[in-house]
Amino acid sequence: MQPYADAMKKVAKEKDTVCVDLYTASGKFMQDIGPDGFASFFCAPKERTHFSEKGAVVIAELIVKDLSAAKTPLADYLKK
């Protein structure tokens, strides 16, 4: 997945647009809580693609954090 994340960042830079790097942010979050901790963030025990409601909230919070930090005009519309 890293090559895709790198390509995304490269295109965002070329287009002079904001890049929300969920690959890095979610990866760090998952590492911090460990495999036993993040199981409930997905829909099924062995599945790591689709988030549960709990996982979707965490991902949304990561997006809000990155958009707020990027100081984009969109940040004015985000709930804090």
Image (cartoon, helix red, strand yellow):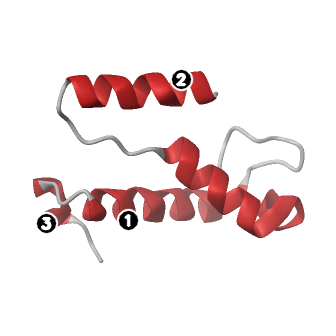
Picture quarter with the C terminus: bottom left
Q: Which residue is mark 2?
A: 4
Asked whether residue 52 appears in the rendered view, the answer is no
* Cα distance between the residues tagged 2 and 1: 21 Å
- In terms of depth relative to the viewer, which is nearer, 74 or 31? 31
Mark 2, secondary structure of its residue: helix
- Mark nearer the N terminus (2 vs 3): 2
Closer mark to the observer between disc 3 and disc 1 = 1
Question: In the rendered image of this protein, does residue 78 appear above or below residue 26?
Answer: below
Q: Is residue 18 left or right of residue 72?
A: right
Mark 3, secondary structure of its residue: helix
Q: Which residue is mark 3?
A: 76
Amino acid type, residue under disc 2 in the picture:
Tyr
Q: Residues within 10 Å of mark 1 (few under 14, many from 20)?
A: some
Q: Which residue is mark 1?
A: 65
* Cα distance between the residues tagged 2 and 3: 29 Å
- In terms of depth relative to the viewer, which is nearer, 44 or 9? 9
Picture quarter with the N terminus: top right
Closer mark to the observer between disc 2 and disc 3 = 2
Q: Residue at x 41, y 27 (%)?
A: 8
- State how many labels appear: 3
Q: Residue at x 88, y 50 (%)?
A: 45
Asked whether residue 68 appears in the rendered view, the answer is yes
Horizontal and vertical percent position of residue 34: 82, 63
- Quarter of the rendering containing residue 19: top left
Q: Residues within 10 Å of mark 2 (few under 14, many from 20)?
A: few
Q: Is residue 44 left or right of residue 2?
A: right
Horizontal and vertical percent position of residue 41: 71, 59
Amino acid type, residue under disc 3 in the picture:
Asp
* Cα distance between the residues tagged 3 and 1: 12 Å
